[in-house]
Amino acid sequence: MTLSEPTTDLSHIDYWIFDLDNTLYPVTDKLLAHIDTHMSGFVANFLSVDAEEARRIQKSYFRKYGLTLRGLMIHHGLDPVRYFEEMTPMDLTEIDPNPALGAAIADLPGRKLIYTNSSRHHTEMVLDRLEFGDIFDGVFDITAADYVPKPAVEAYRKMCDLHAIDPARALMVDDIARNLEPAAALGMTTVWMQTGAEWAKDVTPEAHIHSMTRDIMEWVTDTVAIRS
């Protein structure tokens, strides 16, 4: 395994699947605090608990299900429509435009997809903020996944069916290592985008991670050069 370099042979890849948050742009400490505050506020209001208990529940469900929303749906009957109606949008001013990365991704040969545990609306706002333009062929969001988040393998299968993806010819990039395990199990090539985020600490790369990088721009441009 190499760091900040593409997997050696990517000649078979014709579908490039990218996670969004903390993969195509860095989630800053300020932005993460904003998300945590608003998520905890929602949980506290919905469950009528104090802020400390809300944060404990929020983190517990995120670790167990990959998404706090999923835990609230399973254990408390939350209607996801209410969640998306009441959650305050992120402060996108913390996201710096990066049209050069968008142009580099556009040069990858084949189709490109965003696979995110967030909503399509959030995805579209972020891509607009990044100034990527119309480079992706589709977005597979939490609604398309029937609110089953990564890393549940059934969501990956649904994505492949919906977008006619042959996993053996697909590559997936994600900042959460465990999200790459089902992708690899289905036959995808995987790239771990390493960050300093809490959920990326003390993670040992395993067999389901084929390559890793700390610089998404470097990885994309090197990959484009290999496939040229």
Image (cartoon, rainbow, N blue to C red):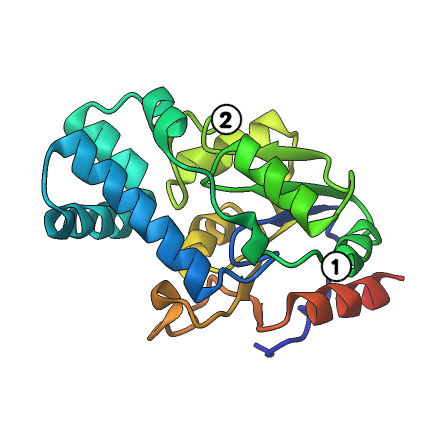
Name the residue that disc number 2 marks. 144
**Mark 2 and mark 1 in contact (Cβ < 8 Å)?**
no
Number of residues whose C-alpha sits closer than 10 Å to that of mark 2, classed few (under 14), some (14–19) or many (20 or more): some
Name the amino acid, label 2: Ala
Q: Nearer the viewer, residue 9 or 228?
A: 228
Find the distance from the CA under tag 1 to the CA under tag 2. 26 Å
Secondary element under disc 1, as helix, strand or loop, is helix
Classify 10 Å Cα crowding around label 1: few (below 14), some (14-19), many (20 and above). many
Q: Which residue is mark 1?
A: 101
For the residue pair 13 and 121, the one nearer the viewer reads as: 121
What is the three-letter code of the residue carrying label 1? Leu
- SS type, badge 2: loop
Left or right: 81, with 131 as reference point: left
At a point 84% along the width and 53% down the height, the residue shown is: 107
Q: Is residue 47 above or below residue 25?
A: above
Q: Quadrant of residue 111?
A: top right
Q: Where, quadrant-wise, is the N terminus in this rendering?
A: bottom right
